[in-house]
Image: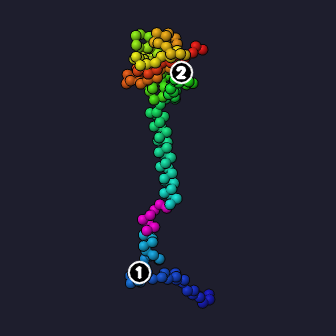
Protein backbone atom coordinates (compact mmCIF):
# COMPACT_ATOMS: atom_id res chain seq x y z
CA UNK A 1 0.00 0.00 0.00
CA UNK A 2 0.87 3.53 -0.10
CA UNK A 3 2.29 5.66 2.51
CA UNK A 4 -0.22 6.72 5.04
CA UNK A 5 -1.07 10.33 5.43
CA UNK A 6 -1.86 11.65 8.76
CA UNK A 7 -4.38 14.32 9.37
CA UNK A 8 -4.20 16.52 12.37
CA UNK A 9 -6.85 15.93 15.00
CA UNK A 10 -9.00 19.03 15.41
CA UNK A 11 -8.79 20.59 18.83
CA UNK A 12 -11.75 22.29 20.40
CA UNK A 13 -11.56 26.08 20.49
CA UNK A 14 -10.20 27.43 23.70
CA UNK A 15 -12.65 29.01 26.04
CA UNK A 16 -11.79 32.45 27.23
CA UNK A 17 -10.09 32.39 30.51
CA UNK A 18 -12.20 33.29 33.52
CA UNK A 19 -11.60 36.83 34.66
CA UNK A 20 -9.35 37.19 37.57
CA UNK A 21 -10.75 38.52 40.83
CA UNK A 22 -8.94 41.80 40.38
CA UNK A 23 -10.68 42.31 37.04
CA UNK A 24 -14.11 41.61 38.58
CA UNK A 25 -13.63 44.21 41.28
CA UNK A 26 -12.29 46.80 38.85
CA UNK A 27 -15.55 46.90 36.81
CA UNK A 28 -18.74 48.51 38.25
CA UNK A 29 -21.47 46.00 39.10
CA UNK A 30 -24.20 48.24 37.65
CA UNK A 31 -23.97 50.29 34.50
CA UNK A 32 -25.41 53.75 35.17
CA UNK A 33 -26.73 55.32 38.37
CA UNK A 34 -27.02 52.81 41.21
CA UNK A 35 -29.29 55.15 43.23
CA UNK A 36 -31.82 55.35 40.38
CA UNK A 37 -31.89 51.60 40.02
CA UNK A 38 -32.42 51.11 43.76
CA UNK A 39 -35.29 53.62 43.72
CA UNK A 40 -36.91 51.77 40.82
CA UNK A 41 -36.80 48.53 42.79
CA UNK A 42 -38.15 50.24 45.93
CA UNK A 43 -41.14 51.64 43.93
CA UNK A 44 -42.68 48.51 42.36
CA UNK A 45 -46.01 50.20 41.44
CA UNK A 46 -46.23 52.94 38.86
CA UNK A 47 -48.84 55.70 38.70
CA UNK A 48 -51.24 53.76 36.43
CA UNK A 49 -51.24 50.83 38.84
CA UNK A 50 -51.94 53.11 41.81
CA UNK A 51 -54.78 54.89 39.95
CA UNK A 52 -56.36 51.55 39.03
CA UNK A 53 -56.02 50.34 42.63
CA UNK A 54 -57.75 53.54 43.84
CA UNK A 55 -60.61 53.03 41.37
CA UNK A 56 -60.95 49.44 42.53
CA UNK A 57 -61.20 50.57 46.15
CA UNK A 58 -63.90 53.12 45.21
CA UNK A 59 -65.86 50.50 43.27
CA UNK A 60 -65.69 48.06 46.19
CA UNK A 61 -66.79 50.80 48.61
CA UNK A 62 -69.76 51.64 46.37
CA UNK A 63 -70.72 47.97 46.04
CA UNK A 64 -70.41 47.51 49.80
CA UNK A 65 -72.62 50.53 50.42
CA UNK A 66 -75.23 49.26 47.97
CA UNK A 67 -75.20 45.84 49.60
CA UNK A 68 -75.48 47.38 53.08
CA UNK A 69 -78.41 49.54 51.96
CA UNK A 70 -80.21 46.58 50.42
CA UNK A 71 -79.59 44.42 53.50
CA UNK A 72 -80.32 46.98 56.21
CA UNK A 73 -82.14 49.86 54.45
CA UNK A 74 -85.88 50.36 54.26
CA UNK A 75 -87.80 47.63 52.49
CA UNK A 76 -89.02 48.23 48.95
CA UNK A 77 -92.64 47.80 50.05
CA UNK A 78 -92.63 50.91 52.19
CA UNK A 79 -94.08 54.13 50.91
CA UNK A 80 -92.58 57.55 51.31
CA UNK A 81 -93.64 59.54 54.35
CA UNK A 82 -95.99 62.37 53.43
CA UNK A 83 -97.69 64.90 55.60
CA UNK A 84 -101.37 65.63 55.24
CA UNK A 85 -102.24 69.14 54.12
CA UNK A 86 -103.87 71.51 56.59
CA UNK A 87 -107.32 71.15 55.01
CA UNK A 88 -107.40 67.43 55.84
CA UNK A 89 -107.27 66.21 52.24
CA UNK A 90 -104.97 63.26 51.66
CA UNK A 91 -102.08 63.70 49.25
CA UNK A 92 -101.03 60.88 46.96
CA UNK A 93 -99.01 58.17 48.57
CA UNK A 94 -98.56 54.46 48.59
CA UNK A 95 -100.81 52.04 50.38
CA UNK A 96 -99.77 48.85 52.01
CA UNK A 97 -97.68 49.29 55.08
CA UNK A 98 -95.61 51.52 57.24
CA UNK A 99 -94.41 54.77 55.80
CA UNK A 100 -90.67 55.24 55.38
CA UNK A 101 -88.77 56.18 58.51
CA UNK A 102 -91.30 54.50 60.85
CA UNK A 103 -93.55 57.57 60.82
CA UNK A 104 -96.92 55.86 60.50
CA UNK A 105 -98.90 53.22 58.69
CA UNK A 106 -101.55 52.78 56.00
CA UNK A 107 -104.33 50.21 56.08
CA UNK A 108 -107.93 49.54 56.98
CA UNK A 109 -109.57 50.09 60.37
CA UNK A 110 -110.22 46.76 62.05
CA UNK A 111 -111.68 48.18 65.26
CA UNK A 112 -111.83 51.26 67.43
CA UNK A 113 -111.60 50.62 71.17
CA UNK A 114 -111.55 53.79 73.26
CA UNK A 115 -108.44 55.73 72.28
CA UNK A 116 -106.90 52.75 70.46
CA UNK A 117 -107.43 51.94 66.78
CA UNK A 118 -106.37 48.63 65.23
CA UNK A 119 -105.28 49.03 61.59
CA UNK A 120 -104.72 46.08 59.26
CA UNK A 121 -102.01 46.83 56.68
CA UNK A 122 -102.20 45.69 53.07
CA UNK A 123 -99.63 43.02 53.95
CA UNK A 124 -102.07 41.61 56.49
CA UNK A 125 -100.33 42.60 59.71
CA UNK A 126 -102.23 44.42 62.44
CA UNK A 127 -100.86 47.63 63.93
CA UNK A 128 -102.12 49.04 67.21
CA UNK A 129 -102.52 52.82 66.99
CA UNK A 130 -102.76 54.77 70.23
CA UNK A 131 -104.29 58.23 70.12
CA UNK A 132 -104.42 61.22 72.44
CA UNK A 133 -106.47 64.38 72.76
CA UNK A 134 -104.03 66.10 70.38
CA UNK A 135 -104.46 63.45 67.62
CA UNK A 136 -106.35 64.88 64.68
CA UNK A 137 -108.75 62.68 62.75
CA UNK A 138 -109.76 63.68 59.24
CA UNK A 139 -112.61 62.05 57.33
CA UNK A 140 -112.45 64.21 54.21
CA UNK A 141 -113.16 66.86 56.77
CA UNK A 142 -112.17 67.02 60.42
CA UNK A 143 -113.73 64.20 62.40
CA UNK A 144 -113.60 62.21 65.60
CA UNK A 145 -112.45 58.71 66.46
CA UNK A 146 -116.06 57.61 66.46
CA UNK A 147 -116.22 58.59 62.75
CA UNK A 148 -113.78 55.77 61.91
CA UNK A 149 -115.53 52.53 60.94
CA UNK A 150 -114.16 49.04 60.36
CA UNK A 151 -113.23 48.52 56.71
CA UNK A 152 -112.20 52.15 56.12
CA UNK A 153 -108.74 52.79 54.68
CA UNK A 154 -106.81 55.26 56.79
CA UNK A 155 -103.39 56.90 56.85
CA UNK A 156 -101.86 57.19 60.29
CA UNK A 157 -99.05 59.64 60.96
CA UNK A 158 -97.08 59.43 64.16
CA UNK A 159 -94.21 57.81 65.98
CA UNK A 160 -93.65 54.07 65.85
CA UNK A 161 -92.72 52.50 69.17
CA UNK A 162 -90.27 49.66 69.70
CA UNK A 163 -93.16 47.18 69.93
CA UNK A 164 -94.48 48.26 66.50
CA UNK A 165 -97.42 50.28 67.82
CA UNK A 166 -97.93 53.83 66.53
CA UNK A 167 -98.67 56.91 68.65
CA UNK A 168 -100.84 58.90 66.24
CA UNK A 169 -100.47 62.57 65.52
CA UNK A 170 -103.04 62.44 62.72
CA UNK A 171 -105.39 59.87 61.18
CA UNK A 172 -106.85 60.57 57.75
CA UNK A 173 -109.58 58.36 56.31
CA UNK A 174 -109.28 57.68 52.59
CA UNK A 175 -112.33 58.37 50.43
CA UNK A 176 -114.25 55.22 49.42
CA UNK A 177 -113.22 53.79 46.06
In front here: 4 or 168? 168
**Residue farthest right in this picture:** 2
Does 57 sit above or below residue 82? Answer: below
Q: How crowded is mark 2: few (under 14 residues within 10 Å), some or many (20 or more)?
A: few
Q: Position of residue 27 (x, y in %)?
A: 43, 81
Tell me if 91 is positioned left or right of 68 in this view.
right
Residue 102 is one of the magenta-drawn residues: no
Give the extent of the magenta segment: 39-46
* Mark closer to the observer (1, 2): 2
Please give the name of the residue rendered at 41% of the width and 24% of the height, measured from the top-left corner.
Answer: 160
Q: Position of residue 50 (x, y in %)?
A: 48, 57
The residue pinned by badge 1 equals 24
Please give the name of the residue rendered at 40% of the width and 10% of the height, measured from the top-left corner.
Answer: 114
The quadrant of the picture occupied by the C terminus is top right
- Give the secondary structure at mark 1: helix
**Residue farthest bottom in this picture:** 3
**Displayed quadrant of residue 134:** top left
Instruction: Tell me which numbered mark, 1 or 2, is placed earlier along the sequence.
Output: 1
In front here: 87 or 130? 87
Does 15 sit above or below residue 152? Answer: below
Q: How crowded is mark 1: few (under 14 residues within 10 Å), some or many (20 or more)?
A: few
* Disc ID at residue 87: 2
Does 14 sit above or below residue 149? Answer: below
Q: Could one spot residue 130 in this view of the protein?
A: no
The quadrant of the picture occupied by the N terminus is bottom right
- Give the secondary structure at mark 2: loop
Please give the name of the residue rendered at 37% of the width and 24% of the height, measured from the top-left corner.
Answer: 162
Q: Could one spot residue 137 in this view of the protein?
A: yes
Please give the name of the residue rendered at 58% of the width and 13% of the height, measured from the top-left corner.
Answer: 176
Residues at marks 1 and 2, CA–CA distance in whole angstroms: 99 Å
Q: Position of residue 36 (x, y in %)?
A: 45, 72
Amino acid sequence: MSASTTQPIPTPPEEPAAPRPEELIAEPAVQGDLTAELQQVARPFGKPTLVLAGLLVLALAFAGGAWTHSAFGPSSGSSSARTAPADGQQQGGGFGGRAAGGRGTVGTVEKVDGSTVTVKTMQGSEVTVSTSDSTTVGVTQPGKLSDLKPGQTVTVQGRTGTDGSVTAQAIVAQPAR
